[in-house]
Image (tube, rainbow, N blue to C red):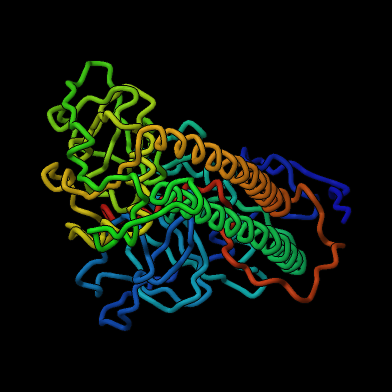
Amino acid sequence: MLIKKYPDYKESNEKWISLIPNHWEMVTIKSILQERKLRNSPIKTDFILSLTAKTGVIPYTEKTGGGNKAKDDISKYNIACENDLLINCMNVVSGSSGISNYYGAISPVYYALYRRCDQTNIKYVEYLFRNSKFYTSLVGLGNGIMMKTSSTGKLNTVRKRISMNKLNRVMLPLPSTQEQDQIVRFLNWKTSEMAHFIHEKKKEIRRLEELKKSIICKYSLEGLEKNRGFYKSQFPWIKKVPLGWKETRLKNILKKLTHTVRPNDELLICSNSGKVFFRGESKMGLVSDSEDIYQGVRKDDLLIHGMDTWHGAIAISEFDGKCTRVVHVCDSSENKQYVTYYLRALAFLQVYKKITNGVRENTSDFRSWSKARDINVLVPPRKEQDEIVDFLNQKCLEIDEIISTISKEIALVQELRTKTIADVVTGKVDVRGVVVPDYVPEEDELDLDEEIDESEEDIEEEADD
């Protein structure tokens, strides 16, 4: 498929898009979109909608992650109709916008925009609003905007609203109605193909991750020896124990450590992936600034997260640093890597969920060492531990290398998708003559622009009128 540029261009007088095709116009948002000012008072609906940069517009009940809770008094909400373009006035500069497929109640921080006439394709406008060059150009419109820019240049946090009066004056490139429709057809087609590719690749990764878990479970609980004998365990969740292994409790093979925090120690996170990393700009592990809630960590310490144990948040640290006291910092006379594999295997088998009650949903409650130390464990002879670790390290490395290759393929397609959308909606390429198939594959998980911040945050501060 050969796609070429338009024959002629002209200056747009806008910094984010210097040139547009000669026959396109630059128009204000107000000239093509109008704000829907419909209050939910008296209450017309209790179906609340949520808008995030990652997922677009979804029912509030399907929302996951953080963000503010819905207001108890939904009469303070506004109304959005199907095909309205919703914009989060406090987060639009990080791409928080999307078309609603529902009639429902929306937070006062959302603008619900509908087209003034049939000559505007609202989907074309949505593609524009989710173009990073466009939405980052809006930064200067909000006086006192606060933001956190990550090392990759993403805008992660915004706290001041941009008024509709200012948004109304923003200029957008606008081709003819027929060309808008063709652009939308083309992008729907290409982004669907790319989304389907990404979806299938992510399924491959999930299958590989499950394979890795099954390998860890099998060999950390049964060993490498074939045709060996077993005896019945006293623990109900273990069906058999290899001959020569012993059954004991965690306290008999681990020693809990207490390190002081040093001035330059950085905060470490014991993650569900079985890795320890520096928190840096991540929101994970965000806790109080008070140093007395931290403890020191030294390289090669074994970390067990007391609340996320059942997720597999158990790992050996490759760094010196500090961590929250919810994490147990340990040493062992056994092979610590084997102990780590074994404890993670129990997480994969959901043993921790069976032997403890979490303080919140999807958590374990081993915050107290008096509870964690009584976890039942199997211990092979040290020589066999070393052999199991060497085998599992090699198998996990092989699987991780495949996953890494697939992840790079996904990243490349995500970049291509972002560039394709940006090039087409800004007129860098001409798709007028491209024949778009009548059948467009279903969009398995279409995120219009993966470089948009994937936070689930739904900001509602300063929202009351």
Which residue is painted at 49% across and 41% down in the image? 392
Hey, which quadrant is residue 281 in on the image? Answer: top left
Which residue is painted at 52% across and 42% down in the image? 396
Which residue is painted at 51% across and 63% down in the image? 98
Instruction: Name the residue nearer the viewer: 124 or 331.
Output: 331
Q: Position of residue 432 (x, y in %)?
A: 83, 61
- Whether residue 93 appears in this view of the structure is no
Relative height, residue 383 to residue 326 (above, below): above
Relative height, residue 376 to residue 199 (above, below): above
Relative height, residue 141 to residue 266 (above, below): below
Q: How many marks?
A: 0
Q: Quadrant of the N terminus?
A: bottom right
Q: Please state if 170 lies on the left or on the right of 376 as rendered.
A: right
Hey, which quadrant is residue 19 in on the image? Answer: top right
Instruction: Name the residue nearer the viewer: 185 or 116.
Output: 185
- Whether residue 152 appears in this view of the structure is yes
Q: Position of residue 244 (x, y in %)?
A: 34, 44
Relative height, residue 347 to residue 79 (above, below): above
Instruction: Name the residue nearer the viewer: 229 or 460.
Output: 229
Q: Position of residue 110 (x, y in %)?
A: 39, 62
Q: Position of residue 113 (x, y in %)?
A: 49, 67
Which residue is painted at 34% across and 41% down in the image? 380
Q: Quadrant of the C terminus?
A: bottom left
Q: Please state if 384 lies on the left or on the right of 208 as rendered.
A: left
